[in-house]
Amino acid sequence: MTDEIEALDQSRMIVLSLKPRFAEAILAGTKTVELRRTRPKIEVPTHALLYASTPVRALLGTCIITDVRTANLTALWREYGSRSEVSHKEFKRYFEGLDIGTALALSHQQPLDRIVPLQDLRAKPRGFRPPQSFAYVDTKTGHRLLRMAA
């Protein structure tokens, strides 16, 4: 086990809501940086659950956020653009109206044994609600969601 995994924040996890193509690229290892308009309030490293939005609408896998960087958009693109799986045009459109953005460095991508569809996630007590961008869940809830994939 690496030092990164051993130092994981044990108090909570983060659920990242992603377009399906980005969730799949993270799990394939071709997307190692997730760009965000809003900086999440997390300690690194943090365990992330990867939720693919419409039309997939399912929990697909996990990864570890190993670093969080906020920077002006020019610096953000220069440093992280090639690892983000977005074109410069998509980058500019996504960050339109902002001067700064955030990059989440990702590692230890792991697909779930089986995807967990939204209807299954919602069926549990205090049913799951997919976040617009991201949401924090306590570790107990995060592990309960992951056990659904076993």
Image (cartoon, helix red, strand yellow):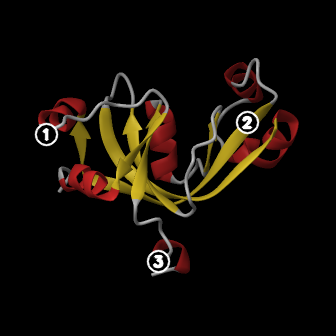
Q: Which residue is mark 1?
A: 124
Does 131 appear above or below 8? above
Give the quarter of the image for residue 36. top right
Q: Are marks 3 and 1 in contact (CB under 8 Å)?
A: no
Quadrant for the C terminus in the image: bottom left
101 vs 146, left or right, is: right
Q: Position of residue 21 (x, y in %)?
A: 48, 33
Pick the residue in front: 60 or 98. 98
The label on residue 101 is 2
The residue at the point 57 percent across, 62 percent down is 44
Image quarter (top left, top right, bottom left or bottom right) of the N terminus: bottom left
Residue at 24% across, 31% down: 118
List x then y, in percent, for residue 113. Answer: 24, 55
> Mark 3 or mark 1: which comes first in sequence?
3
For label 1, the crowd category at 10 Å Cα-Cα, with few meaning under 14, some 14 to 19 and many 20 or more, is: few
Please tell me the numbered disc located at residue 6: 3
Whole-angstrom CA distance, mark 1 to mark 2, is: 35 Å
| Residue in the image at 57% along x and 43% along y | 40
Classify mark 2: helix, strand or loop.
strand
Q: Position of residue 13 (x, y in %)?
A: 41, 53
